[in-house]
Amino acid sequence: MSQNSQMKLDFNNTEIAFRNKSDKDLEKAYWLFKMVASNSLIKIGTPLTNFALNIGLPIQGIIRNTIYKQFCGGESIEGCAQAIQDLGKGQVTTILDYSVEGEESEASFDETCAEILRTVAYAKANPLISFCVFKPTGLGRFDLFAKVDAKQTLTEAEQAEFAKVYDRVDRICKACHEASIKVLVDAEHSWIQDTIDDLARDMMEKYNKEAAIVYNTYQLYRSDKLASLKADFAYAQTQNFYLGAKIVRGAYMEIERQRAAEKGYASPIQPNKPASDTDYNEAISFCLDHVNRIGFMAGTHNEESSRLLAEELLKRNISPKNDHIYFAQLLGMSENLSFNLAAAGFNVAKYMPYGPVKAVMPYLFRRAQENTSVGGQTSRELGLIIKEKTRRKNAKK
């Protein structure tokens, strides 16, 4: 990476950030983030929208053209084709994310597994898709994970049920290994995460012998996850496999703290944001220290952490196109990070949720609620949109 390429990295360059957005798209995004900025509106709007959908009121069209269009790629894999191409024009790759949540039947788990396998086949034929992904509770009951995690004795039926969960995870990871497609295992709540970690570690040991294919997720807003990352790397070294790590800050902070208070145990969450930031940035340094044996994704909307990683690559003389290092953000958010990093030559991927509008609504509501709780995120998005609107207006004079 040259010094010149590094100098081009400007997270305030809104022309690059929004060049795939029409004036109409930009205006929609402006009003959408204005709405998301209102915490009270989100709290009221979420149950009202759920109610309207459940009784069949014709609001899906409104949702599809607003919040859904901003944060989702389409209702099917094929329906995401245009959004995938649009990202590709900005040198940004796609993480296809089947985002149907809340299903609890064996039939739904089998269907989710089959759908994720379809994303693997699609990714194999499309170089603009860099990762596949799955949420473990999309493949098995949350309460079953919780029982395993608590080391409670499973009934014979539950043992058979969990064997099916393991098999679904294994089939996905095996397909990714055979297709040479990286796959991300999403993190979930702390009281089921040990079981997910065990599954991910098993899959890495099985399928990461030649390359980092399976990536576990480390939520650094937990005070113990930097240690977990280091311990998993040490184990990978002894067992001779590559560690795959997606490092994020985390998505369940309020729920985690509330449950810890209710149950009377110490919260697993860091005492404050600076502690999370310190561990996150240390995780970046640790992964770079061992980049030949760790494939890692920095999943972050934090400008400081993104700049730190970019600058560290320069200092260490590591190519920005090193296949072991990716930046990632969510579709429809932090375009200033994604597209400016890509324009400067770094590997960047966007999480692209997809699925039927009604089925994806729980995911979208969760994202909206997270945005209202992340200090400064929504105002930052709005500020960038306003800046670009002003730039375009002045350019037309």
Image (spheres, rainbow, N blue to C red):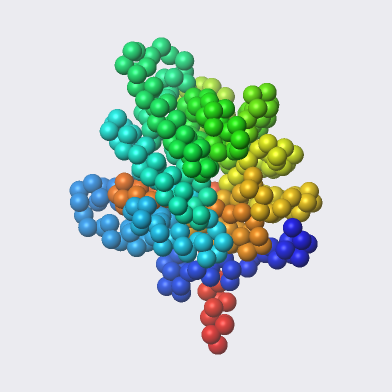
Q: Residue at x 45, y 30 (%)?
A: 170
Q: Is residue 243 above or below residue 72?
A: above
Instruction: Please tell me in which quadrant of the rendered image residue 295 appears.
Output: top right
Q: Residue at x 77, y 61 (%)?
A: 2
Can residue 225 be seen in the rendering of this structure? no
Residue 334 in the image: x percent, y percent? 55, 57
Tell me the quarter of the image containing the N terminus. bottom right
* Foreground of the two, 55 or 349: 349
For the point 49% across and 38% down, the residue is 178
Q: Is residue 59 visible?
A: yes
In the image shown, does 178 or 95 lie closer to the viewer? 178
Tell me the quarter of the image containing the C terminus: bottom right
Indicate left or right for 337 with 152 as reference: right
What x and y, as percent, mark residue 25? 43, 69
Residue 293, percent from left and from top: 68, 36
Establish if 207 lies above or below 181: above
